[in-house]
Amino acid sequence: MSRAKKAMLAFSMMFLLFITTMEAYATTYDTYIYSFWGRAMPSTAAYTPSRILRGADIGVEPFVELSDVAVLDGKIYLVDAGSNRVIICDHQWQMVKEIKTFGKDGGDSFNKPQGIFISQKDKIYVADSGNERILIFDENFDVIHEIRKPPSSFLEDLPFVPTKLAVDKADRIYVIAKGIYEGIIELDSGGAFNRFTGVNKVSVNPVDYFWKVIGTQKQKEQMALYIPTEFRNIDIDPTGFLYTISLPNKEELKTITKDPIKRINPKGEDVLRREGYVGVVGDIHVGTEKMTSFVDVVVDDSGRYSGLDATRGRIFTYDDDGNLLYIFGGLGNQMGTFTRPVALAYHGQDILVMDGTSNTITVFEPTAFGLHVNAATRHQYVGNYEEAASYWEKVNALDTNYDLAYVGIGKALYRNKQYKEACYYFKQGSQKEYYGMAYQKYRKEVLRRWFGPVMTLVILGILLGLLWRLFKRRGSRQC
Amino acid sequence: MLKDFIQFPWYIVTHPIEGFYDMKFEKKGRLTVALTFIGLMALVNIFGLLYTGFMVNHYNPFFMNSIMQIIYTIMPLLLFCIGNWSITTLVDGKGKFKEIVMVVGYAAFPYLIVTILNMVYSNFITPSEAAFYYFFRTFAYGIMLFLLFTGTMVIHEFTVKREMVTVILTLIAMAVIIFVALLFFSVIQQIQGFMYSIYKELTLRM
């Protein structure tokens, strides 16, 4: 083999290697994360697009206008509002069932269904928006119940258009309906109206209020009405807390929406933890650009939740403390980007994103980095800090800019009473609060260790000084 | 050396009125010392950004810019000197510009000491003790302002009441100077743009 040939071979090997590495982490956008300082830092990709599914891939006619997706026990339920059908697939994406007609002799059908939810009891709830009703099916897809407009005063002259829904363990149904500003409609299992929950508070700015007070009747009518923001989407976690997306109102479109994602407890209050370095708002510093506007939220049983942003097609994932875990996705026509993202679902470790215009479902699968982050988050959620730390160390090896990993390792060290090391890690992760706690303990240790020797020296010094003076006096007397 | 840099400044801190009086009439102070203190103040501010303890350091080192930090320190002081001098010449202040600069320099001395000690201390605090750090920081600024007040009062031979009025006027003068400077800069920019467009026009026509 000549030298030239060797060089050629080496070069081609290198090129091949380069190609394969490119293949392994091919995303058409740069993944990033916000640091403690609120700067967008390049970050390792946590998820990469692995498949794009169209109707033909599942074995059904092409999708017309996809509207919602739900997953339970590996089964995937797709709603196609354009062709009025619900499609059920197994976890291998093989079509199990396709429902176009139902009821007596198949005489009933959907009309632009917008939402679907599968309850823990395997009942299927569909928001049949065009027909102004909610349908409840059993696992064989026979209609058990049909909920029409609840006989209550709040919808006197408005049509009841349910769009999204969620169901808790007690079969209470939480419905988001078009044009309802009072909050989320809570129905009991029979479909009777219970109450509104999670009302979005109205905020009035003082300047506008001043003009409203001094304005004439005609001017007042010309001003914008102050109405609470509508809800846009909903999910429920295993403990029965609702995760909701609020629609930003016109005022807020100029700025970052205050708390677009909420976690609503049974009393109807927002209890989402926002302990992260940046708020749970999606992109920060959008400047003059349009702000993030979430369209869907999904939550799993480890407190991890993701919001789907329609403005830039990104998926923001947070842990139960409100720490940003990772960001991926974008708008475009390439793999891993979307035209008009509408819905989001967790499917095992995968994340499914539904596109309502190009009518595709993109399956994102976690990279090694993503798997480690998820595992660490899960362990931390149940309190296995040791286990979590072992995963955080793997995360740290893959991305040294990842603040949370440092904090996670620090937490485990702190519980191990290794305060000095914990201090180092908390400092690396810019976690001032925990650093303070660890430092206090570390300082106490150091003081305890050195107090004895130092005090002994001081007392000895004083004694020596006194003796010295005594001797001196004696000497002077003798002179 | 020791006498110039430690003893006399310390005497000013402990006896501000007599100290500044001596500075003016006994020629005890030196301009080099005052300027050194101002330079040190800029230096201490730069070090403060980097070496203040993690608990109370809210500065992103990514945006660290020493040159800008020096300007941020020196500009306000210089502005005060110019503003104060321009006002006191109008209201019959007896102080010279050199003396005003010296007052500013000597007033920075206690600020330097407290800030350096505070910087060291801040590395050994817990969040609950952060209040002490902030107290000392405020104290450093307070003592500096107090010395500036008494110092200018003594060198201009004012009464307290008159000094207060002068200080307010000085602040206004500083604002006016900033305003004029900004105006000047924007006008210069306009002129530069104009000249450049003429130059471009000519070169393209040739």
Image: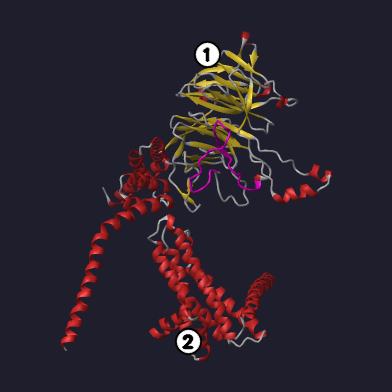
Q: Quadrant of residue B205?
A: bottom right
User: Between A406 and A11, which is closer to the camera in this rendering?
Assistant: A406
Residue A261 horizontal side relative to residue A91, left or right: right
- Give the amino acid at mark 2: Gly
User: Between B26 and A129, which is closer to the camera in this rendering?
Assistant: B26
Q: Which mark is residue B29?
A: 2
B48 magenta-colored:
no
Single out the residue that lies furthest toward the bottom. B26
The chain holding disc 1 is A
Segment tinted magenta in the rendering: A253-280
Q: Give the percent coordinates (x, y) of residue A186.
A: 61, 26
Determine whether A61 is above or below A327 in the image.
Answer: above
The residue wearing badge 1 is A140
A279 magenta-colored:
yes
Q: Quadrant of residue A442?
A: bottom left
Quadrant where the C terminus of chain A lies?
bottom left
Same-subunit check for callouts 1 and 2: no
Q: Quadrant of residue A444?
A: bottom left
Q: Which mark is residue A117?
A: none
Can residue A466 be seen in this snapshot? yes
Q: Give the percent coordinates (x, y) of residue A301.
A: 45, 31
* Secondary-structure class at tag 2: loop
